[in-house]
Amino acid sequence: MRALAALPLFESKPAAATIPKDFREVASGCEDDSGDAWLSAERTYAFPGTRAEVIQYYRTAAERDGWKLEEDPGPSPVPEEKAGLCFTRGGEGEAMMLMIYFMTPRDLAIEGYAAGPEFASGSGFRLAVGSEADGAPTGCWD
């Protein structure tokens, strides 16, 4: 979990993005509710710009960092500005998945947080990295 939380991409953000007061640290955890341990780390940002700007920024930053974008293979994929992005990186024993998705004040309330004024305009978003405990490959749309 520490290795996931220390990934440089968590410090990479669009210039005007800010870290809300309740999200100062990269959160990490381990879930084992399905029998397979899933390690994760995430960071939430507030951004006064558009979702399209977030998408453009992370397409470039993630690919530069070695992440491969996985397109939604569904018959009617949800537009990126609504669904966000999903990337994978690494092979057997070291595979990871990166998701960038958008947060609304309602999403934060469900998690028990009050959306501060930084979420009043623009696009709140979250970077989330996950990995099977053994690093087995997993895809975004599996």
Image (cartoon, helix red, strand yellow):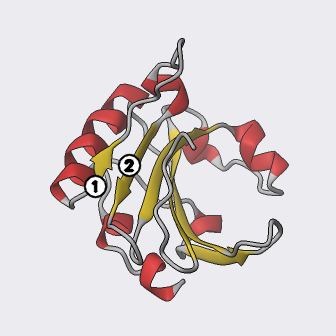
- Asked whether 2 or 107 is in front, the reply is 2
Q: Residue furthest left?
A: 64
Residue 81 sits above or below residue 120 on the image: above
Residue depicted at 54% across the width and 65% down the height: 42
Cα distance, mark 2 to mark 1? 6 Å
| Label 1 secondary element | loop
Residue 50 in sight here: no
Residue 135 sits above or below residue 43 on the image: below
The tally of labels here is 2
x%, y% of residue 77? Answer: 51, 18
Badge 1 is on which residue? 67
Quarter of the figure that contains the C terminus: top right
| Label 2 secondary element | strand
Q: Amino acid at mark 2?
A: Phe
Quarter of the figure that contains the N terminus: bottom right
- Left or right of 22? Residue 7 is left
Which class describes the residues within 10 Å of circle 2: few (<14), some (14-19), or many (20+)?
A: many
x%, y% of residue 66? Answer: 21, 59
Which class describes the residues within 10 Å of circle 1: few (<14), some (14-19), or many (20+)?
A: some
Q: Are marks 2 and 1 in contact (CB under 8 Å)?
A: yes
Residue depicted at 36% across the width and 74% down the height: 7
Q: Residue furthest bottom?
A: 2
Q: Specify the label residue 98 is tagged with.
A: none
**Location of residue 90 by image quarter:** bottom left
- Left or right of 88? Residue 39 is right
Residue 90 in sight here: yes
x%, y% of residue 4? Answer: 45, 77
Say whether disc 2 or disc 1 marks the residue closer to the N-terminus: 1
Residue depicted at 80% across the width and 65% down the height: 34
Badge 2 is on which residue? 87
Q: Amino acid at mark 1?
A: Trp
